[in-house]
Image: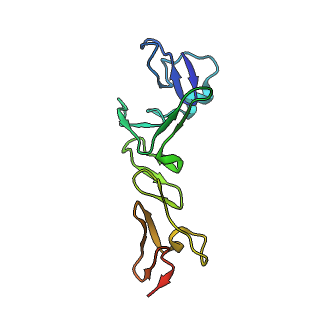
Amino acid sequence: GECWNGVCRRCRPRDAAVDMVCGAACEVAGAAACYAAARTCAADRFGAPRCLGVCPGSNRITGGGNTITTCSGHGVCDEASGECACERGYGGADCAAVCATSAASPLPCAGHGACTAQGCECDAGYFGAECAGAC
């Protein structure tokens, strides 16, 4: 087999058409860095050991350079639960929602709320699309 970006392709003893995460079945000399970075599941999968779940916001681009993104490219998929941990400023199950910043603060939701799929969910005592207004 050959290891690329933490994924083993053309593995033995599995079917040559099946990709799997790097492990003992991926026989590549000098692939220590790949093995060290490997997860139990491929980057866009969860639910080890079978890894049948697909992470939210997943996208595979194949061709000249294989690329796998999860959580709409704005977060990390938890390998056990399949839940996205979104980067600051993004929310929703797939991290596709963009939360507003205000002129008063570069932080999403002005630092006074949580970024959700519906936008900013303001903390108690704050209001507005950016949670910039105080009650």
Among the 4 quarters of the image, the one containing residue 14: top left
Q: Residue 111: x, y in percent?
A: 52, 72
Q: Is residue 112 above or below residue 18?
A: below
Q: Residue 8: x, y in percent?
A: 52, 23
Outermost residue toward the bottom? Answer: 135
Q: Is residue 110 above or below residue 4?
A: below
Q: Classify residue 72 as left or right of residue 33.
A: left
- State the residue in front, 26 or 86: 86
Q: Residue 26: x, y in percent?
A: 52, 18
Q: Is residue 37 above or below residue 84?
A: above
Q: Residue at x 51, y 25 (%)?
A: 22
Rendering colour mode: rainbow
Q: Residue at x 40, y 64 (%)?
A: 118
Report the label total: 0
The quadrant in which the C terminus is found is bottom left
Q: Is residue 67 above or below residue 94?
A: above
- State the residue in front, 22 or 45: 45
- State the residue in front, 132 or 28: 132
The quadrant in which the N terminus is found is top right
Q: Residue at x 58, y 26 (%)?
A: 63
Q: Residue 124: x, y in percent?
A: 39, 80
Q: Residue at x 43, y 11 (%)?
A: 13
Q: Classify residue 104 as left or right of residue 54.
A: right
